[in-house]
Every structure is written in C-alpha cells, then in structure tokens.
Image: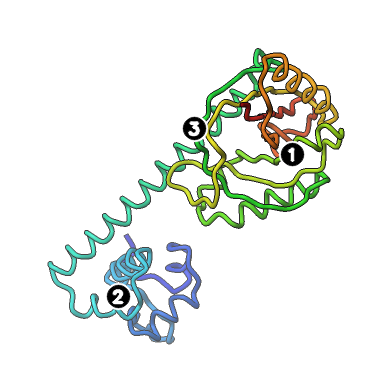
Amino acid sequence: MKLHYTIGEIAKLYNITTDTLRHYEKEELLIPERALNGYRIYTLFDIWKLNVITTMKRLDISLKEIKQFLDERSVEKEKAILNQELQFIEEQINSLEKQRHYINHRIFALEDAQTNDLINQVRFIDYSERKIIHLEEKIETDNEVDLAFHQLMQQSKETIQIYNRDFAVLLPIEKIHQRKYNEYSDAILIVGEGQPYDRTLPQGTYATLRYQGSYQNAEKAYNQLLSRIKSLGYHPGSYAIERYLIDINQTSNIDEYVTELQVIVE
C-alpha cells in the first residue's frame, strides 16, 4: 500500500474535485504535508480524516462541527456519530420500503388494467371514501389533460407521488347527454393513505366500465354504461370519473390504452 498520495490521486480515489480538497484545507479540516517541490502530499492519516469527513457530510453535519469532532474526538462522540449514522440508514431503509410498496402497487395496477376479461364489462363496485388532490379547471384537449396531471403532481408535496398514476378527470353527466365527451370540469389524483389530499370522492356504489384503445371509443362506452344503469332502475350521479389506467405515459400503442369509467349510482 502506498504511504503518500498526491492531491490528484486523492481526488480520483474519492471522486471529488481538487477544489474540494483545497476547501477542506482552507477550513483546516485536512492539512496535507508538503513535498520539497511544494506539492501537497496526503498520508494514510489524511485518508482516515477524509473518510470521517465524507461520512459526516453525508449526515448533513456542518464542516465546523466536523472540525470540532476531529480536534476533540472521543469515544462518546464517536458513539454519537455512529448513532446518527444508524438513524440515517434507518430513514433510508424506510424510504426504500415505501418506494418498493408503491412500485409493487403500480405494477399490480398495470397488470390489472391488462386483464382483458374486464374490458367492456359493466360492474357495480362499492367504494369507500377516496382521498384526492383536486384541480378545478376546464379541460378539453389531450395537452390540457397532460398539463393538469403535471399541475396535480406539483401540488403534491410527497416525492412518492412519482409512482402514483391514479389520475382521472371528471365529466359532468349533462355533457355526456350533449355528446360533449371532452369537456371535463376537473382533474384529480387519487392518493393513498398517509398522503396529503384536499378533497374526497364520496363512498357509494359505482357503475364501472373499462374500454380499450382510442378515446374516440368513449361515446360507445358511455352509452353502454348509462344504458345498463337505467335498465336496473338506478339513477346516475352528477358526473362521471374517467380513470386513465394505461395511456400515452405508459405506451405509444393506442390499442393498449385502457380507460375506466365510473359513475356513482342511487
């Protein structure tokens, strides 16, 4: 093992810049020896110091506090740093566990959307109250739909929302009767437990239908859904929910699109 390293070798070894090492020297955290030619020479003791600095910076400990630890280190302070690092690791584990949960949930949702047996089948499903992030805005084009989704994601403060694609728009029932299938009144993002929300969808029985392919198929799907509701003596609520289970964000093949219509019934 080498006993001395140049500033360039240390920078490469730790994947940091030479400017960073000079800054540590300016702050008196890491003061290398000097060779006869004036070049900085880093010893194994300097490498130990740099390991400590790197670890403590990862824990968001200030350079001032790091210097104090290096100058006045003790067993108790070492234990305190280790406990802090342990807490940091636990937080990372919890974050990764959450991400794994939401990724698995997303995979399940995509696989469920690809279940062909559910396409063009009217089903009645009891939903409990669902939490949503809500954007009240007139939406008429595909670009406006994409913009609305982006705005909803910006409203959410949870980074985990990046895995949530439970996005939908609301279409007033009177617009369906007028055959204006793209005049939406609202956009929503349905969120999970423990995530921020500003409104809820009411609990109740919803008539649902999934259709595949182009959004031009919406008229036929709505006619089938409302006809089934009427034939059973139900009355539809004031709006329909259009959930985009698979859309342009997941595939470039329009034939793979899956949209789910939901209408609460009384």
Image quadrant in which the C terminus is located: top right
Q: Which residue is mark 2?
A: 66
Q: Is residue 3 above or below residue 184?
A: below
In the image, what residue occupies the spot 57% across and 40% down? 201
Q: Quick check: 125 above or below 138?
A: above
- Snapshot quadrant of residue 10: bottom left
Name which residue lies at 63% across and 52% down. Answer: 152
Nearest to the eye among marks 2 and 3: give it. 3
For the N terminus, the image quarter is bottom left
Classify 10 Å Cα crowding around label 3: few (below 14), some (14-19), many (20 and above): few
Which amino acid type is shown beneath numbered disc 1?
A: Leu
The picture places residue 70, in percent across and down from the top left corner, at: 24, 76
From what the image shows, is residue 17 above or below residue 149? below
Residue 110, numbered circle: none
Position of 193 compared to 214: left or right? left
Query: Residue furthest toward the left?
Result: 75
Labels 3 and 1: the sequence-earlier one: 3
Q: Are marks 2 and 1 in contact (CB under 8 Å)?
A: no
Q: Is residue 28 left or right of residue 102?
A: left
Q: Nearer the viewer, residue 159 or 19?
A: 159
Judged from the image, the secondary structure of the residue bearing numbered disc 3 is loop
Q: Which residue is mark 3?
A: 128
Pointer 1: residues within 10 angstroms few (<14), some, or many (20+)?
Answer: many
Q: Is residue 214 left or right of residue 99?
A: right
Looking at the rendered structure, the kind of residue marked 2 is Ile
The answer to which of marks 2 and 3 sits earlier in the sequence is 2
